[in-house]
Image (cartoon, rainbow, N blue to C red):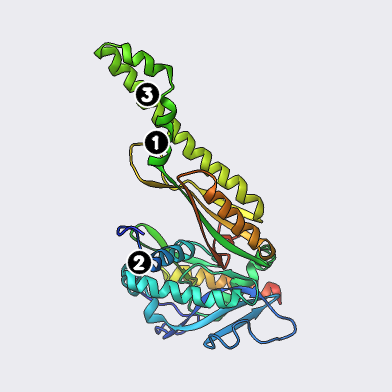
Amino acid sequence: MSGTIVTSSASQAPQEHGWYLYGIVRRDPGGAAPPWSGTTEHLQLLERGGLAAVVARVPVAEFTTEALQARLGDPAGLESIARMHNAVIGAVHQRQAILPAKLGAVYADLEDVAWAMEQRHDALAAQLERVDQCDEWAVHVYVDRPTVRAHLIAEQASDPVQQQLAAAGPGRAYLLRRKLADSLAEKTAQILDDIAEAAYRRLAPLAVEALAERPASPSGDADGEVEVLRAALLVRRERREELVAGVRACAGERPGWRCTSSGPWPPYSFAASPESDGHA
Amino acid sequence: MHDNLPGAREVALLELLDRVLDHGVVIAGDITISVADVDLVYLGLRVMLTSVQRAEELRLGRTTSREAHV
């Protein structure tokens, strides 16, 4: 990859400044104060059609491949970029709907941003409509595996296999114990699945859209608490209390089950329209 | 809270990184920068292109479609 900076003018001299794109908002036809008014004044609005891009002028030297790899490879550098990105997008999000741009999108020329906005105008406008009046909430469901296992072991005490075990010789006892252990592992995994599904079924209907993943394979003998569900929910503001109550209800439903949420966030996970898969 | 659990600040940072990394809309971008196998950054169209020829193609494409909007 070459580090050459190609400018849009006829000149091939490296340029000093580029434009960091924070996100896309709806253009205010009334020409009202920009959505970050009084917070982060270094921002500018680039209007095109019914949309406006929230941009800031940045030194290109900080966003070359080498510079970015160095900054992002250092946890402190990554944190500062992530916090800057979130601070601006969060401030705008409090005032109006925004489609957050992918972290670190830097354009050499404002005309490129305007052109790209024009190209995808209708899809971006539709996506803004979808996230309007909504916040993103992150939900995590954890299960304490020892608690689940202790519960199952208590159940196994009444298993007929236990009676057979008492009367069995060493060979048969070995096989029976294996059977009990396999059944314990299988039931533990099943309970983790059930909990993840129950939490999702409870919370997803509160959301306009929900994305969920099973972060870890709950099989194996790893002990302690495992995360069984990680979800991003796009929730309308008027349903916020319902969501918080739902998370609280999940947390208390069964012993060993913990559910946490964070939010409200700007709609990071819902900025890309589904059909475009995030790409132009 | 156990000693081996991350503190509230670390949790908040992890949650933030989970939200902002590899999420968000890409209106036009060519280059992805990955650090430790995580796709972090898309650079805009014209910042650092692999070849001048590609830049020319994009510029021509842009000019054509801008004219179409006039």
Amino acid under disc 3:
Leu
Which kind of residue does numbered mark 1 sit on? Answer: Ala
Q: Residue A182, image x and y in percent?
A: 37, 26
Judging by the rendered image, the residue that carries numbered circle 1 is: A150
Res A121 visible? yes
Which badge, 3 or 1, is on the more N-terminal residue? Answer: 1
Tell me which corner region of the image, top left, top right, bottom left or bottom right, holds residue A55.
bottom right
Q: Which chain carries label 2?
A: A
Q: Mark 1: give few (<14), some (14-19) or many (20+) Cα within 10 Å.
A: few
Name the residue carrying label 2. A1
Q: Which mark is residue A180?
A: 3
| Disc on the earlier residue, 1 or 2 | 2
Q: Do labels 3 and 1 share a chain?
A: yes
Give the quarter of the image for residue A171.
Answer: top left
Q: How far apart are marks 2 and 3 (CA)?
A: 57 Å
What subunit carries mark 1? A
Q: How far across and how far down the image is residue A33, in percent? A: 66, 87
Residue drawn at (43%, 71%) of the image: A82
Q: Which marked residue is nearer to the observer: mark 2 or mark 3?
A: 3
Q: Where is A153 relative to A52, above or below?
A: above
Residue A201 in the image: state x and y as whole percent.
Answer: 61, 45
Q: Can residue B32 be seen from the camera position used here?
A: no
Q: In which quarter of the image is residue B11?
A: bottom left
